[in-house]
Amino acid sequence: MKDNIFTDIPVQYESIANATTALAFNMASDLYTGSLLKTLVASKLSGRILELGTGSGLATSWIIDGMDENSKLVTVDNNALLMDVAKQNLPDARIEFICTDGYKWLQGYKGEQFDLIFADAMPGKYDLFEETIALLKVGGFYIIDDMLPQNNWPEGHSERVAAFINHLESRKDISLTKLNWSTGIIIAVKLRLINDN
Ligand SMILES: C[S@@+](CC[C@H](N)C(=O)[O-])C[C@H]1O[C@@H](n2cnc3c(N)ncnc32)[C@H](O)[C@@H]1O
């Protein structure tokens, strides 16, 4: 099995990738993560999907390919230049693009919970995790990438990553699997907490 052969790359991917290179954006999600997201999203019929950190829309293109016609994606980023690339390449009524600060958005959101959250920005991952997991339905997926050392990590980030993984592992309300694959992926599912008094 060759896991680096992708037979279902989204049609918009190449155009987004070219624009991403032109903008010298170096935090883009890779094909492995995109492919995994598409597969997990496809398990959520009429799903509500949240992406924190749209970037230029590379993972977004995979996510919408996994969505059925009744699914909805909310995607949040504070960089208008990057989000415009996603908007131009992915004109799709199922997507709500929100260009705002993720910290403010997470603290102010009062809508329905989500079936899958791809947390690919500081808010939702290393910050405001409690608020983010509260937005996930029981049985929903919480997905993160970039958990293995990356060239663009700033000083002190590896300690933050290690502490975050420890925190995730200590929680009783999620079941998780760590994958040393792609950039380092964690797949977590939110559990119903049974009161065993
Ligand atoms: C790892 S990149 C996302 C990559 C993207 N998911 C992809 O498929 O290529 C992280 C993104 O988080 C965004 N970001 C950083 N700080 C943010 C904030 N406070 N609120 C919202 N977005 C933020 C950046 O603009 C960047 O696009």
Image (spheres, helix red, strand yellow):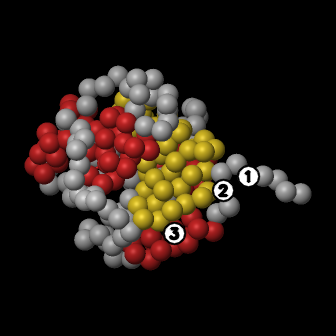
The numbered disc on residue 165 is: 3
Residue 127 image offset from top left, x and y in percent: 50, 58
Residue 136 in the image: above or below residue 124: above
> Residue, x 20% and y 41% (percent of image)?
13
Residue 45 in the image: above or below residue 136: above
- Element at badge 1? loop
The numbered disc on residue 126 is: none
Camera sees residue 159: yes
- Inspect the image, locate mark 3, and give the three-letter code of the amino acid beneath it: Ile
Alpha carbons under labels 3 and 2: distance apart? 14 Å
Residue 19 image offset from top left, x and y in percent: 13, 44
Classify mark 3: residues with Cα within 10 Å, few (<14), some (14-19) or many (20+): some
- Quadrant of the drawing holding the N terminus: bottom left
> Residue, x 57% and y 52% (percent of image)?
189
Say whether marks 3 and 2 touch (CB < 8 Å).
no
Residue 128 image offset from top left, x and y in percent: 53, 55
Circle 2 sits on which residue?
Answer: 173
Say whether marks 1 and 2 touch (CB < 8 Å).
yes
Specify the quadrant of the image occupied by residue 57.
top left
Chain-order first, disc 1 or disc 2: 2
- Inspect the image, locate mark 1, and give the three-letter code of the amino acid beneath it: Leu
> Residue, x 44% and y 70% (percent of image)?
161
Chain-order first, disc 1 or disc 3: 3
Classify mark 1: residues with Cα within 10 Å, few (<14), some (14-19) or many (20+): few
The numbered disc on residue 193 is: 1
Residue 41 image offset from top left, x and y in percent: 43, 40
From the viewer's perspective, is 178 left or right of 93?
A: right
